[in-house]
Image: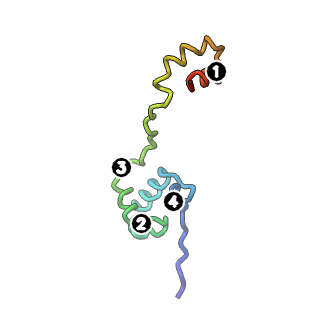
Amino acid sequence: MASKSRTMIPIEGLGGDMGNRDVWHEIHSRFKLKEAKRSIARALGLSIQTVRKVLRREEPKQYRRRPAECSILKPFEAYIRQRLGAVGFCAQAIFEELRK
């Protein structure tokens, strides 16, 4: 009995190099060529649920940055801006003033 050789495509997030956009295109192109979902999942090293989820998307998932979190210096921003000119733009001096 001959064993089938499977080509595994490394996928980012699963320890590989292939990005989400590439995975989306690969899955959709294979599915359009009438390849079974299970076969796609095996070939790419994904679960069948992941293949189904990707096929439900009309476009590749877009990268989104997380919203910026509030800085711990935010309450002192006005004071820092005011003092910058007075101390010759010396961050160390402002740091020491804030520590007091």
Q: For this rendering, which residue is in front, 70 or 21? A: 70
Three-letter code for the amino acid on which mark 4 is drawn: Leu
- Asked if residue 25 is positioned above or below residue 85 in the image, the reply reads below
Three-letter code for the amino acid on which mark 2 is drawn: Ser
Secondary structure of the residue carrying tag 4 is loop
Secondary structure of the residue carrying tag 1 is helix
Q: For this rendering, which residue is in front, 93 or 58? A: 93
Q: Which residue is label 4 attached to?
A: 14
| Residue farthest toward the front in the current orientation of the protein | 100
Q: Which residue is label 3 attached to?
A: 58
- Asked if residue 43 is positioned above or below residue 1 in the image, the reply reads above
Q: Nearer the viewer, mark 4 or mark 2?
A: 4
Three-letter code for the amino acid on which mark 3 is drawn: Glu
Q: Number of callouts in the render?
A: 4
Name the residue rendered at 46%, 43% in the picture: 63
Q: Which residue is label 2 attached to?
A: 47
Residue 95 at what x, y percent from top left? 60, 25
Disc 3 versus disc 4: distance between alpha carbons?
A: 22 Å
Q: Which residue is label 1 attached to?
A: 93
Disc 1 versus disc 2: distance between alpha carbons?
A: 56 Å
Disc 2 versus disc 3: distance between alpha carbons?
A: 19 Å
